[in-house]
Image: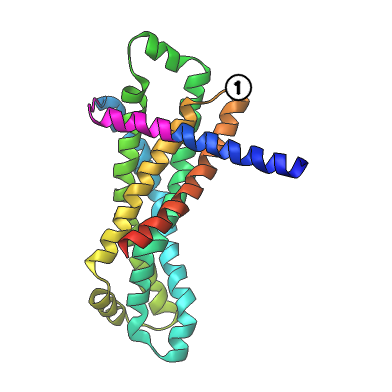
Amino acid sequence: MGLVARVGAWFLGIAAVVGQLTLFAGQVARATLRPRLDGLETWHNLYRVGVKSLPIVAVTALFAGAITVVQVGAYVVKLRAYEVVGWGFGFSVFREIGPLLIGLMFSGRVGANNTAELGTMTVTEQVDALRALAIDPIDYLVMPRVFAMLAMMAALTVIGDVAAIVGGVATAYGLIGVDPYVFWNSFTEYVALADFLNGLAKSTVFGLLIGVVSCGFGLNVRGGAPGVGRAVNASVVASAVGIFVVDYFLTWLLQ
């Protein structure tokens, strides 16, 4: 009975978190019907979310492209199928590896920071002060962050794809001797625009998911400083799990 009780409590806890985030997502959706973005706050978040994440995203994508080529290199050499390296690289990186890795890096860096910032504002009653001044925290704090994450996740994915191509071409030429022209010809011939748009659509949804989850946990912090720590941890975990769940359904819908 103790095991059953613990399992039941675990499911009830998950249901409570999902319900809380669903209600918060409804508030965000309602706010989009009457968008009132604060200009200065929006630009600040675009810079903080996008520009400051650019170096780590570019490095991650560069090595992701290189690793992809390394993984397929042994089979390419064995089968002498050098002309399919670009196709295999582009299909996997554009559709799956790029959006997933960038989404997880984005969640760990931006989502955690966002939850910590909003959580600190909540426990120090700054959010309550905004309400006392008749300022809606959803409009002033949440919407600029969600918009910035959605827009910058898409932009960073495009930049990450370019960095991954550079890493893939360099690794293919340096390790398995595939001429850059052969790689590029295979890439442009077999990788379609739909593959790129597939990954871009996924990354945009991931950005929206990370924004809603991180803001939701940040504004619902309870328990002072320890509560902020728990919220940051829960936000990163929930965002990572959500990314994989959403990716599963988007892959099925966009195939």
Give the image quarter of residue 135: top left
Residue at image position (23%, 78%) is 189
Amino acid type, mark 1: Gly
Assess disc 1: are there few (<14), some (14-19) or many (≥20) residues with their C-alpha within 10 Å of its C-alpha: few
Query: Chief secondary structure of the magenta span?
Result: helix
Position above or below: 165 against 227: below
Position above or below: 208 against 68: above
154 or 67, nearer to the observer:
154
For this view, does 209 lie left or right of residue 42?
Answer: right
Residue at image position (34%, 54%) is 202
The magenta stretch spans residue 27: yes
Position above or below: 252 against 8: below
25 or 238, nearer to the observer:
25
91 or 10, nearer to the observer:
10
Estimate the x, y position of residue 16 in percent, counting from the top left. 54, 34
Residue 114 shows up from this direction: no
The magenta stretch spans residue 17: no
Q: Residue furthest front?
A: 1
- The scheme the figure's colours follow is rainbow
Estimate the x, y position of residue 40 in percent, counting from the top left. 27, 26
Q: Which residues are magenta?
A: 22-36
Estimate the x, y position of residue 19 in percent, counting from the top left. 48, 34
Residue at image position (45%, 39%) is 111
Residue at image position (38%, 13%) is 131
Estimate the x, y position of residue 96 in percent, counting from the top left. 39, 62
Residue with the mark numbered 1: 223
Q: Quadrant of the C terminus?
A: bottom left
Position above or below: 178 against 156: below
